[in-house]
Image: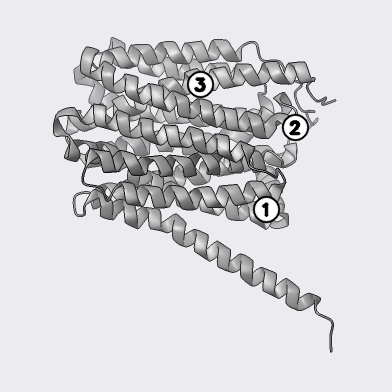
Amino acid sequence: MNTLPTPRQSSRNAHLIIAARLVSDFGAFLNMVALATYVYLLSNSAMSVGIFLASRVAGGVFASLIGTTFYRRFRGRSPLVAFDVLRAGLLLLLVLLPVAQHAQLLPLIAFGLGLGNSMFAIGLNSQLPNMISADQLLKTNAWLTSASSGAMVAGSLVSGLLVAGAGFEAVFALNIVTYLLAALFVLPLRFPAPEVRAQPERSNGEWAVLRDGLRSTPVIAAMLVLSMADTLGSAAHNVGFPIISRLLTPESASTTLGLMLAVWACGKLIGARIASRLPGSENVNLERRFFFGVLLMSSGFILMFQQQSLYGLLLFALPAGLGDGCSEVGLMSRLQREPDRLRLPIFSFLTLLQMTGFGVGMLIAAPFYSLWSPGGVVALFHGIPLGTLLVLRGLALRGERARRSSQRPAP
């Protein structure tokens, strides 16, 4: 039988998970800054950056397709530890092998990192309600987002400084240590696993459960659609980060990229804290925080990429981060309130939508940077989630009018 964690277990698990997330994301942002710049410097091509990032996304897509089946069979902390070790092993290749082989290896490493990142996220997010008591979920999600943001600040700044002072190899070596340390934080986790069915459903049964669940809660379907649309904008600005950094400060692109991500992360941390402290914790409040966060984030990125100076770039990175933090806390907290049987397929499907949108967006956005300015490309791609948000709002208003009309008494 499935039992809820005791308050002491819940608090202990929360502290361990937050610590693991902090250390893991610190490492992730170390290699995010370093690898994006590394690929661009090796190839001097925006298309190569796009291909590298698309390979990372392809690993995430693969993870989303196998995530539900995998975590129905393998539960608990062991898979989370394994995916930390996998990511450390992949980065070890960049330390051990000669630089001449890196260009050919980087897409493969990117695929493995994408797989490990997504499988870790699916397992953690879908099992979090089994580790943390329900009344602590919103607070824990906010702290997880805050930890991720703090890690982004530190990882982005340290990466730029390490690249400038000690080279890329030092960043990769430190990154390996962080993933192994994150695995050590996951090891002590204890939580009651959900009740296992005698005969697991086949994969098409899982998708049928998801389809029926989304039909019964259309607002969840709307949140998933908007999440996918938002990844198209995210793809454009991720490809554009090293490009605009080099355009504005050719002599210190890595440092500029680190500063930009650090300010964005500060905004994300503040946004997560605000989202957890706003009054109201009902589903509708979480949904509103998500929709407003996407609006603020996309608007912030559009304004950010219109700037012609480093100071302007950093100024508008802050509201972009605020929206990101608010939307992430709202989305995660709302989806985790779904029943256990539906929660795992939802998180696998969310990963599939985000990774597909991210991969398609990167492949489409990269060629645009050779034709348009970075500001034009980001405005085009972040206009997609803003347009989607307007359409969803229009459909919601239309549905409300239809319901009110059907409830009027007949003359």
**Regarding mark 1 in the picture, which secondary structure is present there?**
helix
The numbered mark at residue 135 is 2
**Residue occupying the point 74% across, 34% down:** 200
Q: Earlier in the sequence, mark 2 or mark 1?
A: 2
Circle 3 crowding by C-alpha within 10 Å: few under 14, some 14–19, many from 20: many
Mark 2 or 1, which is nearer the eye?
A: 2
Does residue 37 sit above or below 370 in this rendering? above
How far separated are the C-alphas under marks 2 and 1? 25 Å
Image location (x, y in percent) of residue 19: 56, 17
**Regarding mark 3 in the picture, which secondary structure is present there?**
helix
Q: Amino acid at mark 3?
A: Leu
* Residue labelled with disc 1: 214
**Residue occupying the point 84% across, 85% down:** 410
Circle 2 crowding by C-alpha within 10 Å: few under 14, some 14–19, many from 20: few
How far separated are the C-alphas under marks 2 and 3? 22 Å
* Residue labelled with disc 3: 22
* Number of callouts: 3
Q: Earlier in the sequence, mark 3 or mark 1?
A: 3
Q: Residue furthest bottom?
A: 411
